Structures are given as C-alpha cells and as structure tokens.
Image (spheres, grey):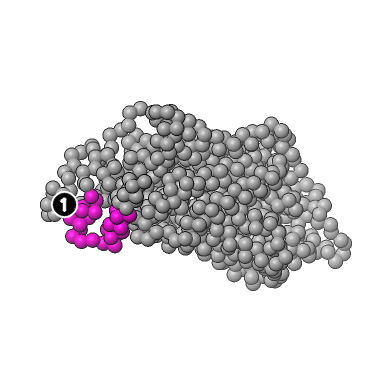
Amino acid sequence: LPSPIPCSLTQPVTPELLVSPSSQDGDLGSQCPEDRGNWTGRLDFLLSCIGYCVGLGNVWRFPYRAYTNGGGAFLVPYFIMLAICGIPIFFMELSLGQFSSLGPLAVWKISPLFKGVGMGTILIVSLVAIYYNMIIAYVLFYLFASLTSDLPWQHCGNWWNTDLCLDHHVIKAGNTTFPVNITNTVSPSEEYWSRYVLHIQGSSGIGDPGRIRWNLCLCLLLSWTIVYLCILKGVKSSGKVVYFTATFPYLILVMLLIRGVTLEGAWKGIQFYLTPQFDHLLSSKVWIEAALQIFYSLGVGFGGLLTFASYNTFHQNIYRDTFIVTLGNAITSILAGFAIFSVLGYMSQELGVPVNQVAKAGPGLAFVVYPQAMTMLPLSPFWSFLFFFMLLTLGLDSQVRTEVTEPTTVSRQPGGLRGPSYPSQFAFMETIVTAVTDEFPYYLRPKKASFSAVICIALFLMGLILTTEGGMYWLVLLDDYSAGFGLMVVVITTCLVVTRVYGMKRFCRDVHMMLGFKPGPYFRACWMVLSPATMMALLVYNIIKYQPSEYGSYRFPAWAEVLGILMGVLSCLMIPVGMVVAVLQEEGTLWERVQQASRPTMDWGPSLEENRTGTYVASLAGSQSPKPLMVHMRKYGGITSYENTAIEVDREMEEDEEEESMM
C-alpha cells in the first residue's frame, strides 16, 4: 500500500519565519501528536509506571524469593542487580519512547533492520494477554465469593470436599488429644481452589480440556469488559483510572500490614522472612535469582514502558521518574513481605506447624494459603474482600509477578506458576493498540475504540480454553513458554542495537536533547557492558536449568512440550524474519541493503518539528523551517535552557561531521 500523506501536508502550511509574531497564535505541537493522544496531567505517566511495576508479584513472589535465598541477605544482591540491570534498561526504554513518541513497532525506525524485535514484542504481549486476564478472572471469582457471611472455603463438608479435607479448627481443637499428620491432608481452601473453582478433576490432562466452567467464563468476560472500558479513550482514560488503581492498593496493603503485625505469632513469620543468612551470598544461584526478580519485576521488554513514555511531552524528566518508580517498586516489595509473612506467622502458630510448611509463592499463596489465613481472622469475609480487591487493582494496572524457573530445591505445587513477570492488562492493551495504530495511523487512529474492542473480543475468544476444566494445564503451558526465553532475547537485542548499531554517542545525544544533560558514565557502562552481560547470563542460566512443564504430579506430554518450545522460539524468529523483509525493501548489493536497512529512517527523531535539531532538522515530511531553534526564538521571544541544549547539540554534530570528512 502506498504511504498515506503526512498530516503536515494535508493543509497549506506557511513557513514560520514568514509569519509575523502577531499572527502566530497556536502551538507547533498541535499537529499529529495531539491526534495520537498525550497524558492529560503530569502525574498520569508517573502513576501509570508505578502501577505498571508495583503488582501482584510484589505480594506473591518477592517475599517467597527473599526467604528462600538468604532472607535479609537477599537484599544485597537484589539492590546490586537493580543498579546494574534494572535501572539502566528501564531508563533506556523510557528514553526511546519519549524521544520518538512511537510505539514498540514504529520505534524501530531507529534501525528498520531490527523491526522484527518489535514484532516479537507484540507477539509475546499477545500470548501473555490471552491468559493474564484469566488470573484476573480468578481474582474476580474470589472477590464475589467473599461477599458472604461465611467464606465457602472455611470448612470441609461441601460437595467438592474429599475425605482428605481437614480444616484448621479441627487441628487446633484436636492437637492435644490425637496427633494430626497434615502432610496427608488437604486444607479446605486448597480443595475449594482445585475442585470447585478449577474443577480440575473433570480433566485427565492438557489433551482433555473438558467442559467450559461458565462461572469462570463470565468472570473472564467481565475482566475483559473492565479492561476495555478503562482504555476506551486511550491514555486520556487509562491515565485517570490509575489515580485510583495505583494508589488504592497501598491503602489496603497498609491495612493488611497493620492487622498482620498485631496478630499473635506475627513476629515468628517476619523473623523467618528477614533473618539474614549471609552464607547464601557465596552461591551464584542467589545472585541469579536476584537478577531474575529485578528483570521481571520492572516489566522491561514488554513494550509497556516504551508505550507509556511515548505519550509524554518531549522534555518530561524521565530520569527522575526512573529512580522514583524503580526504588518505589523495591520498597513496596519489602513492605509487602511484612504484610504477608506476619499473617503466615500467625497461621503457623494457629496450626502448630513451622512457617516453611505454610509459606508458598505465586497463585498458591493468593488462592490457597492467604485465603485460608483469612478464615482464621475475625470478620474474615471483610479481610478476604479487601485482599482480593487489592489483587484486582494490582492486577489491572500492575504486573503479575511469577517466576521464570522454580528453584530446583522447591517442588512445584498446584496453583503455582513459574513463568516470567507480566505487565498489567492496561499496559498490554495500550501496547498492542498503540503499536498497530502507529503503523497505520491514518486508518486506525480515528477508529481506535472499535479497534480496541476487536482486539479484546479476539483475545477473549482465544482465552476460552482457559475456562475449561483442564484450562489450568493450558495456562501453565502459556505461562512457562510464552515469554521467558523470547523476552530476554528481545531485551538483549534492543540493548545491543541501541548501543552498537545506532551508536552510544548518538543515543546519549538524543537524551541530551530531551533532558538537557547526557547520561553519565554509570549508565553508559551499564548499557555497553554490564546490562547485556547480565541478561546473557540469565538467558544461559534459564537454558541450563530448563525443566519440563508440570502441574503437581501431572507431567505434560511430549507434544505439549514441543508446542510450548515453539511458542517461545516464535517470538525470536520474528527478528530474522524482520531482517529479511527490511533487506528486500532496499536496493543495491546485499551488504549495501543491510547497511541501508540498519540506518535510521529519514523521519526518525522527535515527533514535533520544534524539538528537532541538528541532523533531525527538516527531516519531517512537509517541514518548512530550516532551524526549529529560530522558530522558538521567533515564537517565544527568547532562548530557554532547552534551546541552549539545542545549540550545543548542533555544535557537536557539526564537529563530528568535520571529523568524519577529514578521515
């Protein structure tokens, strides 16, 4: 299809330097980017990023990972890996999005040869989004089930319970008269989860999905409906929703924390959580686990950060925002650990068993252990409702934090997922919709609401298999393979392309244009060496420690393993496919085509003409001004700090051009 006419050419444009100051009423920024949409307030972006990073994994993954890897000593490698791998890659993604005002597909104008990286990102996000909302559906199911005077998972004796069911009231009342071996029993909450919510006994395995669970199907439909309504008007609507969804979970978390630390036996759980075991620091596994937690807890590579930043103004201080979000995410994880383990300490004292026998991670904590703990509290339906409402708000605009590889010393329990941490459904949908509409802006942006509805309906239909009696097996398969391997390849490739192909010097100059200062030696060292080396180590570790998928005692058949591996490899194959397409679109010899395809396109750079300087001047179609700096001086009657930055950047570029001509 021929390229559509740029919006700057759809109406006559008078050169700015030929217009008198009195006739210039309007802003140069009132062109295409307004049609694309922008955050309506300064806090919209910051709260969206906080909601994106602070999520379910802070509640159900970090505390478990901390106590199994040295307790308080785990914080040492955690913060070191945050500095080496987390903060630099986080800042790089924000910089790419804000500088270009483009989504994860169109941003590869920076180097069209690698547009397949963006294609791989969208494939990963789409696969994960299919099952991510199923977890939100489970949360909704439990939320509605909490609206009762007596929680349905509080006692045995229901039609779904078996003879193995034993609730804590029997244990507490009978531990003085007869011994109870809880290893041969099942709690009411666990049977409620597996036999009532999932009804997994109706399926013999992944090849036998069974019937659709219509109550779960309706919860899944409600989940997608909520997501669609929240993103209906793009960032203008989702940016306002996060004012509630990003802040309200903190209120509930503080309430749960206060309630937890006032319980009898709470200190036993907190001590178990934070007691430092510094000998663990000598194990490479602990450092790998810390790096994995950082890599996935910040949600890099999913395109969400890049998408959010693309709706910023050009000079938004993302440097400050990077540290606020990343450090806030770490502090929230630690705080959540106190809230969780204080309750687990109380639960272990009530049951008369060690804390490590009740401590679990992932959905096993959210849907089995913590609900059981809620039944031991006065006003248990109230606290249960608060807990699941917190999970709902975290899940809608935050990340589902599960893990890439289960530690080899810990058996995988039913209800526990081991896949990577995932961004929010808001972020998923904004990423997918923004990526596609940026590719076809003149066709899809006017119909963004309809296009978003089509995407939601399609993903809902593809997720129906997850609502069947054997749906958990498919969810586990998707969780294990949809993003773990492919996501790391995407992030490593992005880092290498920006620093090696596009050029570290050019990228730092772009950041200089936006923020008024260049990234320091710390960021440059991490981008060039430390961050990609760390991620490559993680990739190798995951390959070496590969384990076939399993769910409890069920082992997945070979065809399911092959399907999962193909699912993970497919996103990586998008990179060479994109290379072939890019090379075929160029002319000349093979090497000349590769060189041309690896260079930025002519329209790469800031989306607004007023922000383009140096090599970016007049590269937009329909550009009328020889120097945007002169437009600023003419329009606003002076030079600001950013215009001074533009002068410095122009001078540097001229010096570089002179050096290259002399060589």
Between 198 and 536, the one nearer to me in the picture: 536
Q: Quadrant of residue 66?
A: bottom right
| Residue carrying label 1 | 24
Residue 152 in view in this figure: no
Count neighbours of disc 1 (C-alpha within 10 A) and say few if under 14, some if 14 to 19, many if 20 or more.
few
**Magenta stretch holds residue 372:** no
Indicate whether 593 appears above or below 617: above
Provide the secondary structure element on which disc 1 rests.
loop
Quadrant of the image containing the N terminus: top left
Q: Position of residue 252 (x, y in %)?
A: 54, 63
Report if residue 650 lies within the magenta region: yes
The residue at 29%/62% (across/down) is 641
Which residue is painted at 33% across and 54% down in the image? 652
Q: Which residues are magenta?
A: 627-652
Image location of residue 290, percent across then percent down: 62, 57
Q: Judge from the rendering whether residue 656 lies leftward or rightward of residue 184; answer left or right.
A: left
Q: Amino acid at mark 1?
A: Gln
Q: Nearer the viewer, residue 449 or 509?
A: 509
